[in-house]
Image (tube, grey):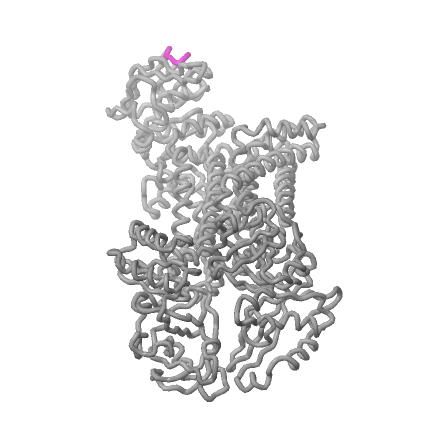
Amino acid sequence: MRFFNNLAKAFLSLGRRGQHNIVKILCLGVGLAVGSVLIAKVYFEQSYDTFFSNWDRTYIISEKAFQNGKLEFYPQTSGAVAPGVKRYAPQVEVATRYTGIADECNCETQDKKKIKANIALADSCFFDIVNRPIIQGNPKEVLSRPFYCMINRKLAATLGDNVIGKELVLKDMSGLRIIIGGVYEDIPLNSSMKDLNILVAMPSLRKMSKFDGSNNWVGNDRYIGLIRLAKGCKIEDIQRSVEKMRQENLPLKEMKQAGVDLNYMFTPLNKIHTSDPAVKKMAWILSLLAFILIFSAVMNYLLIVIGNIVGRAKEMAVRKCYGAKRNNIHSIIFSETLVHLIISIVLAACLIIACRGMIEKLLDASLITLLFNKGSWILLAVCIGILLIGGLVPGCLYSSIPVATAFRRYNESRRHWKLLLLSIQFIAAGFLVSLLFVINKQYSLMINDNPGYNYENLATANMVGIKPEQCTKTIEELKKLASVESVTSADYLPHNHLSGNNISLPGDDREYMNIADLYSVSDGYLKTMDIKIVQGKSFTEQTDSLREIMVSKSFVDKMRLLAHWDNNAIGRRVLVSEHSQSSTATYTICGVYDNIRVGSISMPDDRASVMFYSKKACPNNILIKFHNLTNDNMKEAQQLIQKLNPDKEIYLTSYKSTMQTIYQPQYNFREAVLIGGIVTLVIALLGLIGYTNDEVVRRQKEIAIRKVNGAEVNDILHLFIKDVLRIAVPSLIFSGVGALIVARKWLEQFSDKAPLSFFLFLGSGLLVLGIILVAVGINCYKVANGNPVEYIKGE
Amino acid sequence: MIKIEGLCKSFRTEEVETIALNNVSLEVKNGEFVAIMGPSGCGKSTLLNILGLLDNPTSGKYWLDEKEVGNLKERERTRVRKGEIGFVFQSFNLIDELNVAENVELPLTYLNVKAGERKERVREILKRMSISHRASHFPQQLSGGQQQRVAIARAVISNPKMILADEPTGNLDSKNGEEVMNLLTELNKEGTTIVMVTHNKHDATFAHRTINLFDGQIVDTVNDFV
């Protein structure tokens, strides 16, 4: 009963002057809001691919290839490998494989409903491993029938009621028709399979394409293979079986002659994402950020509570005089902390809901998924920790003040506590601001970097599904627009994730290297992209360009080392797997272009690249170089393209915005650190203001005496600023060093790194110091300029 | 040195207006020792605060050395006060975190006197006040009489023209109080104008003139000769 009384009193005394309860609640609430979202994100990332049962026994098969002295790993295998492992290893309960065949494919139903979907081929064992609840249909049966498919719940909802038996026309895949046979529950967002909307039965492949590699042992290694071990078995147990499988099915002798040694490795599926260095670093930094935020908020709470000791000492002494025991004091303080915590949690919830859109955009996950999972237990534990620390520590301090001392004006300031806590907050704020500067610099470098080609005024449109002749006509019409400088087309753009092929020489069985294959480009590609030719010439219609190949400078450099070429690559003939159907189907190097960045700075691809010539337009991508890329010019071109191709929705996008989208994760990270940094700085400033307020109260007599003896405003401000500088300067130096260490680790993932200069850290430290000094100055100005009589009167 | 005419000071809260000083006029000549007496709440300390430029009157005029200083802002008051007026308080008002020497040199610090000169002047004044042996001690380590002597040392170190003392012997026993009054008399003989607020009739006898205040008004002036 008394406890509930205390709770009620605590609630009613929220507005009591001098206790800064609103500031306490604000600090805690904001810290909890941002900290919990970050904790939720880290947990979300760490629990990747754990949404299905027996995930802890599920492994992904990767290729481990030793080629020309270099060890490479590929997360995909040839089609026969996964079922082969199951056949050979009795410890494997079930195996499956799937492969993506279309991203954002335009599809249409019989009743002309248009949708976009990510489509993969999957075998009938897919749902034996990825056991999502099945809403309709029998997945084993559906995924065994050619041209039948399973779709996810979200897509089914878009298509309306009773989707079973409905036909989907895949417009981007030459109008291929598939029939919906079943519906499965959506795959959660923290999964490598989250984007799969449609799973088409694997047997469809032999009827879809001339080439069916689903049972290949070598080559066409595009399949993601998964196995599940039986209970009690270890992955090491299957190694002998896998070796036997290798010996019996792979052409090991021929591969050896070609300089290739191929083996397989098995990694727990859930570890693939979490062991990615970029994901690890991100998790580490976000965890640190969350810790700093929550720690700062809690420390601020304690700072203010400890500052209140002077003011409340007499109150507690009076209570003790009237019989209050230690428990009673603890109960009062605990109730107050509980009330503050509850209100802070409510405030945090409101803040999170209010900023839902921004949070989901920055963290690339839905709020419900982020917060309502097992990671919520961590948040609960944090709240309990806050309650215990915030509720018990101040109670102990109040209980320890002797009554007599309190009545004789208890002035024990516990400054060293407060200064320590303040120092920690300064370190946190300084660290985050410095890190922010680095992240911003890196992001600027990424979006403004020179990838070896010029994408200024360049726009692209995806024309997959449009016939080459129609594509050619569109290009011709586009060229007539006054705003257009040139138009070309290409199968793939340099920033795409490029497939690989192997290079060998005529009469030599060896495969010298794997290259990034840009596949075909049409007329004017190099000119439009402003790619410099360093040797030879570009493709032209006058020569047999169909048997010509252009290679990057790094291709020539590597062949110089591997095949002892001289500097002149022009006229050399090479064999390119997939393109060269026989050992005589060589390609002649007609030109060497300057190195271009393939992939991105965050996901670099350091392979050499090659490109082939296509007489016809390549429908995958049309590239339009404008004289001046404006919204109006883009709109005009967009309208023309759509007019010429009314059956398909085609969107023109600036290349620059595509590049910015590629670096969206870094942008989001920058924004997350910015928000974290601002919140930490605000919390630190609130703590600082609380500290200076307490110091002003504690030293008001001293201030009055100094003013009486001639101290002016600047002299009084100097007192407080000197006091704060003593902890701020060493704290900011320490934080700068910490930020340097973390920044270096973070930058390791990028191929091009922003330079870390001393002045960057000095500047950020000075910025935080400036903000701190301004806060102190503003807060103390009133008392510095006040009438000393007011303070002396109090004496 | 000091001339006030029709000085009024009132304090307003939401509900009540208190008139601390009501139409007070007086003059203090250079080198005079004036005592202000009166019952508690009569406005003695308020008058002293205004004379010391620690507060502004609500109305009336105040000339200090023929300059009107009655309506200056806090910043300007500080500048005028600096080095010209010394203060001695009943509760000494020493800064606990500073030792005796540091307390005494405080006014010189704000007058931008160089460190070497400060040190010399502090040494001299502490010797004069017979507390050189306590220069590195802190106020908590001193007796009441010693603390007041430190306060007086601080008040005179900048050679002010005027010292304002608010019940300087109020917290002292008779022996120490006598010592303090003798010190003040000595300083006055050297030419320093002293205005002292006191309850103590004995202390008032040290002054050339006693002004009696009652309910914010001067009711009586008694000339005493020491």
The quarter of the displayed image where residue A719 is located: top left
User: Could you say which is closer to the camera, residue A362 or residue B124?
Assistant: A362
Residue A24 appears in the figure: no
Magenta: main secondary structure equals strand
Q: Look at the picture and state if A641 lies above or below A341.
A: below
A770 w.r.t. A346: above or below = below
Residue A310 in the image: state x and y as whole percent: 55, 34
> In this view of the protein, which residue sits in the foreground, B155 or A86?
A86
Query: Residue A394 location in percent, x, y?
Result: 61, 39
- Of all residues, the one furthest to the top in this rendering is B219
Residue B200 in the image: above or below residue A82: above
Residue at point 42%, 71% (across, down): A519
Q: Is residue A655 above or below residue B220?
A: below
Residue at (48%, 78%) from the top-left corner? A577
Q: Which residues are magenta?
A: B215-219
Q: Position of residue A545 (x, y in %)?
A: 34, 77
Split into 4 quadrants, where in the image is the N terminus of chain A? top right
Quadrant position of residue A342: top right
Question: Is residue A648 toward the left or the right of residue A485 in the image?
Answer: right
Identified at 44% across, 14% down, the residue is B16
Determine if residue A637 is in view: yes
**In the image, farthest residue toward the front:** A110
Q: Could you say where residue A531 lies in the image, as x and y percent from the top left?
A: 32, 69
Q: Is residue B23 left or right of residue A768?
A: left
Asked if residue A656 lies in the magenta stretch, the reply is: no
Q: Does residue A400 appear to the left or right of A105 in the view shown?
A: right
Confirm whether the magenta stretch covers residue B218.
yes
Depth check, front residue: B188 or A385: A385
